[in-house]
Image: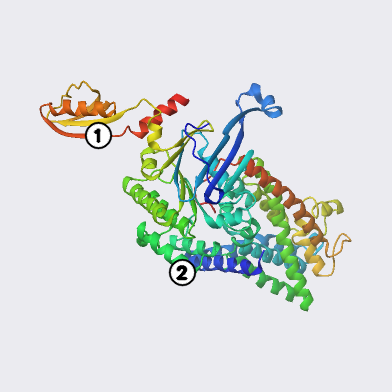
Amino acid sequence: MEVKRVFSLLGLYARMDLAWFLRDTKHCLICILGDLLSNIAAISGVFLLALRFQNFGGMNDSEVLFMLSYLMAMSGIQEIFLRNCNVSYISRRIGRGQLEHMLLLPLPLPLQLLTEGFIPFSGNGTLISGFILLRYSLLRLELQPHGWWWLSLTGSLVLSVVTVIGASYLFATSAFYAPVACEEISSRVFGVADALKIFPLSGMPLGLQITLCSVLPVGLLGWFPCLALLGKAPLGLPGWFPLAFAATLWLITLTLFKKGLRHYASIGINRYSAIGHRR
Amino acid sequence: MPASASTATPPSDIAVNLEQVTKRYLQWQRSGQVSNTLKNLLRPEQRVVVALNQVSFQVRQGEFVAYAGANGAGKSTTLKILAGMLHPETGKVEVLGYDPLQQRIPLMRELGVLFGNRTELWWDLPIQSSFAWKKVIWDIPEATYQHNLEQALEMLELKPLLNTFARELSLGQRMRADLALLLLHSPKLIILDEPTLGLDVLAKRRMIDYLKQLNREKGVTVLITSHDMDDLEEMAGRLLLLSHGELAFDGTFDALRKLTTIRRHITVTTDSQVAPELERATWLRSDGFAHLYEVNSDPRNMRLLLGELAEQPGLVDIETGKAPIEAVVAELYRRWR
C-alpha cells in the first residue's frame, strides 16, 4: 500500500467533507456542537461519582477525569478517521450486501476502509473536546509530560481505537453468514464498549479485571492504558500488553474476515439495500 | 448447447471468455410451523438452485451483445461473476484478459459496471462531487477526465444537474448520471444490468443513443441485460439467451425469429373499421381503422398478398414489420419452461 496513495485518498475525503461543511455550515456546526455536548454528558455521570466518592473505583477524581478525557479523545480519533460510510459499523455494509460496491473500485479493500471514513471537519467535535479535557486533566494531575510520554499517549490512543475496531470487525464476520441477524452486530459491540469503558476497574475483583482486559476487552480501551501512562500498569502486566492484545485480536479478525469474504463471494448476499450504498 | 454457436475467436480479440461456468446456490426452506422447529434447528431443508450450468461464450472486442433470459435465468449471476463479485463454482472466466478474482484491481481500471437497481453516486452529495471522487479513485489523467466528462455531460444532458444531490434526482436522471460516472475512466468493456429499468421513453432514448454511439465511435464493448427485447434488438447485434442457467441461443435476432412459428406482421389501414378478409394473411386484431395481420413472409406469398391488398376498396396504407421480438422470445420462454 503506497503511503502517497493513502494521503491522496485521505485528502479526497477531507475535501468532500469540507465541501459538506461549507455547503451546509449551519447543520454541520449543530452536529459538532451536538457531539461535544453529548460526549460531555456521557462522561459527566462517572466524573461526578468520582468527585463525590473519593477513590471511586480505586482511582482518585483526577485519574478518573484523565481516563474519561482519554476515552473521549479515543472516540474522537475513531470518529474522524472511521465514522463515515459505516467503516466502524462494518456489519451494516456486509449485511446489506454493500461490499459489492467496494469490489468494483480499483483499490484494495484495506485501503478503502482506511480512507473512506475520514471526516476531519464534520467529525472533529469529539476529538477537540477530548483534547481540551485531556489537557485540563493533566493540569489537575500536576504531570509534567515529556516528549516520550506524549508519543506513548498517541500510540495508546491509536491502539485503543485499533482494539475496538478489531472487536467490531471480529463480530461483524458473523454477518457474512447471517446477514439479517447480524447486520447490527457492530453497533452492539460499540454499545457494550461505550457502556462499560467509562468505569474505573481498579476497585473491581481481580477475576473481573482480567475478564474485562481479555475476553471482553473494554478495560484495554481506557482503564489499562491510562494507568500504564501514569506509571501504574495494573494486573502486573507490562505497559505493552495492549499492543500484544491488539496484534493477536487483529490476527484472528483478519483470518476470519478473509474466510467470511470468501464465503460472501461464493454465496452472495441478496439483500441489497438501495438507499445509497455507503449509508 | 446453444441453438447457434458463435465461431471461435483469436484470444487477443476476446473481451469476455466464459468456459463451462457453473454456479449453484443453496436456498434454505423454512416452513415456520411449530412442528418443524426442531427440524429447522438441526437439519434445515435445503434446495439447490442451479443459476448457471456449464455456460460458455465469448464476446469479441467492439461487440454490442444483449444478454437476456426470463427471471431467474442466471443473467445477474453471470454479470456478477464477470465483475468479480461472485466466484463461479467451476469453469474459467476471463474478462479483458484478466481473471476477475485474482486480478480485480487492474480489471476494474478497464471495466465499467452498472446495475440498474443501485447507484455508484454519492447519495448525499451533488453529482459533480461523485465525478471528482471517481477521478481520484481511478487516478484518471486530467485531460482524459475533462474530455470524457464534457462529452458525457453533453450527450446525457447533465449540465443543469451538476449541483443537484444524487438523492434528489429522478430515476432517469440518476441513471444518466450513473452512466456518465461509469464512462469517466474510458472503460474498454461496459457491463450493464437492466440500465433502462423504470426509465420513461425519453430517458430510455437518450441512454440507448449514447450507448450505440459509444460502441460505434469508440469501439467500447458492451454487454447488456434487459427484459425489453425491442430495446435490446435496437442496440445489440448479437443475442445470448439464457434459459434455466443454460445458454439456449447465441446469434442474431433474425436467427432467433426463425426458431419460432411467429411470422411477419402487416398493418393494413382502411377507411372502414371492419377488417378486410384476406386469403393470404391471418387477422390478429383491429385498432380503429388499422388492422393487424400475421403473414407468411415467403416472397411469392408476399407478392400475391400485395396484389390481393391492391384490389381492396378503401385501402389507405400498408405497413409491414418483422415478427415482434417480444412475441418471439415469449414463445421461446414458454417452450423452454
Q: Residue at x 42, y 65 (%)?
A: B147
Q: Position of residue B306 (x, y in %)?
A: 19, 29
The amino acid type, in three-letter code, at marker 1 is: Thr
In the image, residue B92 above or below residue B132: above
Q: Which chain does the numbered disc 1 sit on?
A: B
Residue topped by disc 2: B143
Q: Residues within 10 Å of mark 1 (few under 14, many from 20)?
A: some
* Label 2 residue SS: helix
In this picture, residue A50 sits left or right of residue A235: left
Q: Residue at x 38, y 50 (%)?
A: B212
Residue A48 versus residue B93: which sits nearer the camera?
B93
* Label 1 residue SS: strand
What residue occupies the far right of the structure in this picture? A236
Residue topped by disc 1: B320
- Report which quarter residue B169 is drawn in: bottom left
What residue occupies the far left of the structure in this picture? B313
The amino acid type, in three-letter code, at marker 2 is: Ala
State the CA–CA distance, disc 1 to disc 2. Answer: 49 Å
Q: Position of residue A99 (x, y in %)?
A: 59, 50
Q: Residue at x 81, y 53 (%)?
A: A214
Q: Is residue A223 visible?
A: yes
Q: Position of residue B142 (x, y in %)?
A: 48, 69
In this picture, residue A105 sits left or right of residue B320: right
In this picture, residue A236 sits left or right of residue B311: right
Q: Residues within 10 Å of mark 2 (few under 14, many from 20)?
A: few
Residue B309 versus residue A26: which sits nearer the camera?
B309
